[in-house]
Image (cartoon, rainbow, N blue to C red):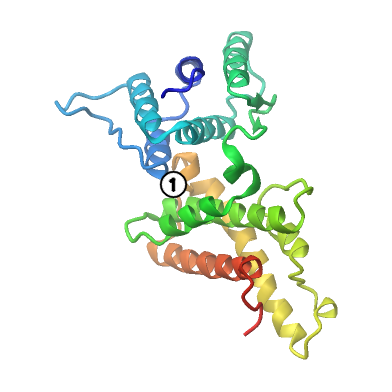
């Protein structure tokens, strides 16, 4: 069943997209690919679809997957708009369109901040708290061998962030999650994964601290790379990361996440 708020949100997004131009077609390509929604730029007859038609078709496709899928789609579109400064210093005409979107999102239980961030548990507990289902889905996506470098960067950043939120939810549920990459060391501290030798009770404290610090450094490297060329931002600044380096980042991220999850799953931290 289609959520009652979907039409108003989709309509408000369409108006704002037509005014701002974002997301671009390439941005929509990346968002839809990440959400496994198949709405190409041309229809079955080979006719090009304009962005409003693609957006409508994307919502229809997401609705078949359930309400959570629709919310994920909305979240990704709004986040792309925020990254492209759609909400920053809007002219009066655009401000009215933003207010329409804010009102429509409120009917779905979401709050749109002045900077364009969606607050509350709009996209469900998996996103709000870094649920394990989200982590598992992103791990599976990152392991796919058909990802281009930009998609690898975007998925790596999302996976590290989701895993950190998952750790925080398990070890310090009242903590307010920070932004990437700072949320990763925040979550590690909550889980007791110290990165200072003086805080580790082991004859190998220095080595263990150094290895744990590599997890932090991986997050610190992936986040800005993704912001420049990752798939979450539509490849508007194409990444210069080679396929070989992207594959290295993929493996670093998967290894770091496996280690972080070990603290939740109960397996030993050190081998």
Counting from the top left corner in percent of width and height, residue 157 is at 55, 53
Q: Which residue is mark 1?
A: 238
Which residue is located at x 78 percent, y 91 percent? 203
Counting from the top left corner in percent of width and height, residue 244 is at 40, 67
Which residue is located at x 59 percent, y 31 percent? 82
Q: Nearer the viewer, residue 113 or 47?
A: 113
Residue 206 falls in image quadrant: bottom right
Q: Is residue 53 left or right of residue 232?
A: left
Q: Residue furthest bottom?
A: 203
Quarter of the image where the C terminus is located: bottom right
Tag 1, which secondary structure? loop
For the question of whether residue 182 can be seen, the reply is no
Assess disc 1: are there few (<14), some (14-19) or many (≥20) residues with their C-alpha within 10 Å of its C-alpha. Answer: some
Which residue is located at x 61 percent, y 50 percent? 130
Counting from the top left corner in percent of width and height, residue 207 is at 70, 84
Q: Is residue 120 left or right of residue 7?
A: right
Give the number of callouts. 1
Residue 211 falls in image quadrant: bottom right
Quarter of the image where the N terminus is located: top left
For the question of whether residue 141 can be seen, the reply is yes
């Amino acid at each position: 069943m289609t959520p009652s708020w979907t039409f108003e949100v989709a309509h408000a997004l369409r108006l704002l997209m037509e005014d701002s131009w974002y997301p671009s077609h390439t941005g929509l390509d990346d968002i839809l690919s990440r959400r496994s929604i198949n709405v190409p730029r041309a229809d079955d007859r080979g006719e090009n679809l304009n962005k409003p038609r693609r957006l409508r078709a994307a919502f229809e496709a997401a609705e078949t997957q359930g309400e959570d899928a629709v919310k994920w789609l909305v979240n990704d579109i709004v986040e792309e708009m925020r990254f492209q400064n759609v909400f920053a210093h809007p002219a009066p005409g655009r401000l009215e369109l933003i207010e329409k979107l804010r009102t429509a999102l409120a009917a779905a239980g979401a709050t749109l901040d002045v900077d364009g961030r969606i607050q509350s548990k709009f996209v469900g507990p998996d996103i709000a708290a870094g649920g394990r289902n989200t982590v598992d889905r992103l791990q599976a996506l990152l392991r796919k061998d058909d990802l281009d470098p930009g998609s690898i960067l975007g998925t790596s950043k999302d996976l590290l962030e989701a895993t950190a939120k998952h750790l925080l939810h398990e070890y310090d549920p009242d903590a307010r999650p920070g932004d990437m990459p700072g949320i990763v060391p925040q979550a590690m501290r909550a889980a007791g994964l110290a990165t200072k030798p003086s805080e580790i009770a082991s004859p190998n404290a220095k080595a263990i601290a150094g290895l744990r610090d590599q997890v932090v450094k991986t997050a610190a490297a992936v986040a800005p790379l993704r912001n420049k060329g990752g798939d979450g931002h539509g490849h508007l600044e194409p990444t210069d990361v080679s396929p070989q380096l992207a594959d290295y980042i993929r493996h670093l991220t998967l290894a770091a996440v496996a280690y972080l999850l070990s603290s939740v799953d109960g397996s030993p931290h050190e081998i």
